[in-house]
Amino acid sequence: MNKNIKITLIVIGCLFLLFLAYYLLDPMKTFANMRNDQRQSELTKISDAITKYAGDNGGVLPKGIKVSDNCSDDANKICRTGVANCDRIDMSSLTKSSKYLSSLPVDPSVNMGNYTGYNIVQSQQGRLTLCAPDAENGKTIVVKK
């Protein structure tokens, strides 16, 4: 075998090992990215359910979505499914008959409490913004409709 080919194969092998070691040594970042992907998917599910709800109700959005330009504000938290006295945003109209969602998705880092870990606001024109304030690795996760 040619000496240059051997050197090239060794270099490629070393680069592959370095690449593999990078991912094996940083599993926390990999898991955080997976949770962020889940957040993005769940916000899209909620957004799609709201769009269907509005379509079935003459364009009317579920009650309680505040007009604001700050989605991350605590006042804009969405309550979990089944919370008896929701003191923030009650989206139970999406889950009552399971027509839109069987239950509201919950952020993967939220273990307990009354809130999903997701927030929602609407603009003056009724445009929705959903966000995941607990996104990781410095990522901002927002879905707009």
Image (tube, grey):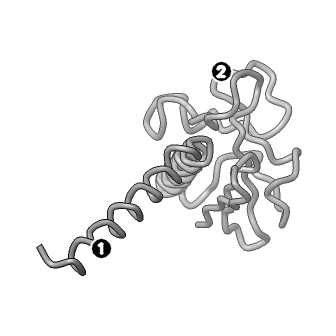
Q: Position of residue 55 (x, y in %)?
A: 48, 57
Q: What amino acid is labelled 2 in the image?
A: Gly
Residues at marks 1 and 2, CA–CA distance in whole angstroms: 64 Å
Residue in the image at 77% along x and 23% along y? 113
Circle 1 SS class = helix
Where is 118 relative to 4, above or below? above
Q: Quadrant of residue 25?
A: top right
Find disc 1 in the rendering and name its residue: 7
Of residues 127 and 35, the one drawn nearer to the viewer in this rendering: 35
Where is 12 relative to 107, above or below? below
Q: What amino acid is labelled 1 in the image?
A: Ile
Residue 127 shown left or right of residue 36 in the figure? right
Rendered-image quadrant of the N terminus:
bottom left
Residue 34 shown left or right of residue 139 in the figure? left
Q: Position of residue 4 (x, y in %)?
A: 24, 81
Residue in the image at 72% along x and 39% along y? 117
Residue 70 shown left or right of residue 121 in the figure? right
Circle 2 SS class = loop
